[in-house]
Amino acid sequence: MEGLLAGNEDAVRQLYARYARPIFTLGLRLLGSAEAAEELTQDVFLAAWRKAARFDPARGRLSTWLMTIAHNLAVDRLRRETGVTKPHLVLVDEVPETLSADEDEPLMERDAAIRALESLSDAEKRLLARAYFGGLTAREIAQDDGIPLGTVKTRLRTALIKVRRANQDKEWP
Amino acid sequence: MAVTCLGVRELLPELAIGVLAPAERDEVERHLRWCAGCRKEASELGQAAATFAFALAPVPVPHGLGERIVERVRHVAGGPGTPRRARTSAASIVAAMVAVASLGWGAAMAGRAERFEDRANRAERETAEALERFVTQIQNLVPPGQDLPEEQFHLGPMVPTAEGQGGGAVLQLVSPNFLDFSMVIVNGLDPQATNRLPYRVQLLNVAGQVLRAGRIAELDADGGAEVFHQFANKDLSGYSTVRVLDADGVVVLTGGIEGNPSGP
């Protein structure tokens, strides 16, 4: 990060080598085209360079920080393009449950992430996917499902806490 | 709007997932600047939400994307020592300054409003840590081969006058090589007293000369605001007094900036 703060190109390359694939993958899944995903990936690394001084390792992992930037930029872009909250929806079965046998370089983050998601029920996975990949707010989900807003908020919180607990004791970079 | 810890925590799952409405997101993030407990919760939920992204089956990135990114960063970064570089550095310092001043105010509020000694002590520790990070960040901002001495940055507190309330802090960069700037953060002004808006921020030197350093058109729910002003054609040497005036010209906050060198 110190290299990134100083605008060091090698630092950008090192970050790229480690995190470009998951960021590009998230962009492709959220935005739906390789072109948009590439723009997003560029924007994420540029934002990381600009915001490097704000990164505090005591408050979270570098990987989480980068992925949060990516997700926020993607959701903001979709909202700008649609004018309101995003109608885009990713099917739940697009959320992988097992490692593919033909993955030549399975990331440590992915392995840990999949194991953490195993702590969720199918309904919880579906709910989080609708919010995280579908960009639906708790209010929108409550309206779609005809259930109280408070119930959706509680379920979202419960699901995230389950993942958080599953993540604990795992050593991510 | 949620300004209490209880209200903020209700919104943290949606913040973590990235679907909070922009207005609510701004409100929550302002709270997180000074509330360590909610910030920890937000960090942990954020990590949990990011798990979903990492669980996706990775796809190959387009050929040459890495070099295109490096080229774009290089273009935006500009050459070392250019005005563009100075602006970027200032923006980074502003972010650190916001953290420092917000935490300072959090400490004051913890001691005055709730009088929980342990909370105040914790806030003070966080302030000290933030100040340490602030100094480190300034040092890190020096481009390789260049010298941007720490002594070119000057920090000072702001206190209320008899007619005012609240507090604040001011940061200045006074540099022979970079564009000078001032950053003023206020907190605890009366957000209900809209008739006192807009507030004006001024810098003064010993000769009584006044520089306009910004305008506060609105306050947040905590009576806070930030004003950043970069001076393209003005040397801030000697402008070591800062004051905030209300719409009637009444000074409500004042402060001194230690270490600001004497003007020419």
Image (spheres, rainbow, N blue to C red):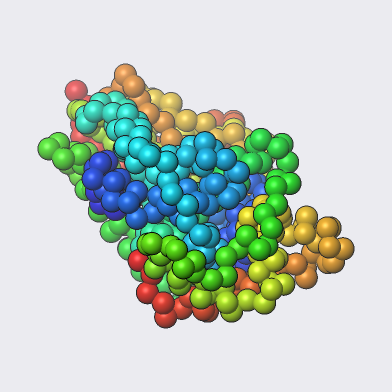
Q: Is residue A163 above or below residue B139?
A: below
Q: What's the residue at 84%, 63% (across, down)?
A: A145
Give left or right: position of A127 versus B171: right
Where in the figure is residue B189, as x and y percent of width and height? 57, 48
Q: Quadrant of residue A56?
A: bottom left
Where in the figure is residue B76, as x and y percent of width and height? 35, 31
Q: What's the residue at 46%, 68% (across, down)?
A: A101
Q: Which quarter of the figure is the C terminus of chain B placed in? A: top left
Give left or right: position of B199 versus A110: right
Of residues A139 and B101, the one nearer the viewer is A139
Q: What's the residue at 31%, 32% (across, down)?
A: B71
Q: Is residue B20 above or below residue A78?
A: below
Q: What's the residue at 53%, 60% (across, down)?
A: B56
Of residues B91 and A35, the one nearer the viewer is A35
Q: Quadrant of residue A45?
A: top left
Where in the figure is residue B210, as x and y percent of width and height? 38, 25
Q: Which quarter of the figure is the N terminus of chain B placed in? A: bottom right
